Amino acid sequence: MKIEIKKSKKPIKYDEAIRIMESRLSEIHNNSSDELIWILHHEDIYTAGTSYLENEILDKKIEIKKTNRGGKITFHGPGQLICYFVLDLKKRNKDIRKFISIIEKTIIDTLRFYNIQTFSDKENIGIWYKRDSEIKKVAAIGVRVSKWIAYHGFSININNNLNKYEAIIPCGIKDKGVTNLKNIIDQNYDNLDEKLIENFILNLKN
């Protein structure tokens, strides 16, 4: 089975994306479909993973979409690249930790291409950028594994509205902020999705 690469230009509704991924998961489990890497974006939505706490919602007026992915609360919206996937870990030694490392390396390698040095953190999942003494998250990761098939994915902040994060404690981490690529280096990121897919495929093979 090969990996299908899908790119959606128009925003995809969150529920629709989950439905498509779960349908693909069943098909992969039954050996009737290819694996999937899917680049898209959502309109404004706050989503809460399985380990979120109510006190991480600072603005009680916002609507929260509860999901079955790992992790806590995050925000999705325009200006953020989302990479969803449905990938069979049975083909990859059933190694969840290594798979998360592949995701981290993919994001770090991609941002290095744009002269942005980032890092992962064992304590706080995601990809981080340090300027002076300030550490801020630039990419969030949230994965669920069912039947040894990994799905959901990760997001990279490119030029999204960072004020939206003020309504929540992003990913449950109080002492670190959130940033985006335009804040770090104001340059053209139009081909970031291409570079990301290239690195993801390469890292999955290694």
Image: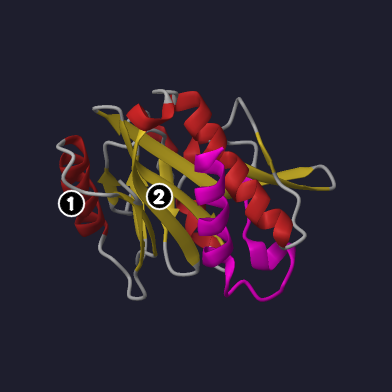
Answer whether labels 2 and 1 touch (C-beta < 8 Å): no
Classify mark 2: helix, strand or loop: loop
Residue 186, position in %: x, y? 72, 72
Is 190 drawn above or below residue 64 in the view shown? below
Mark 2 surroundings within 10 Å by alpha-carbon count, few (fewer than 14), some (14 through 19), many (20 or more): few
Q: Is residue 164 left or right of residue 115?
A: left
Residue 125, position in %: x, y? 55, 34
- Give the amino acid at mark 1: Arg
- Badge nearest the viewer, 2 or 1: 1
Q: Looking at this rendering, what residue extends furthest in the right direction?
A: 132
Classify mark 1: helix, strand or loop: helix
- Which residue range is magenta in the image? 177-206
What's the residue at 48%, 59% (across, down)? 164
Residue 19: mark: 1
For the C terminus, give its image quadrant. top right
Nearest the eye: 110 or 41? 110
Nearest the eye: 107 or 43? 107
Magenta highlight: main SS: helix
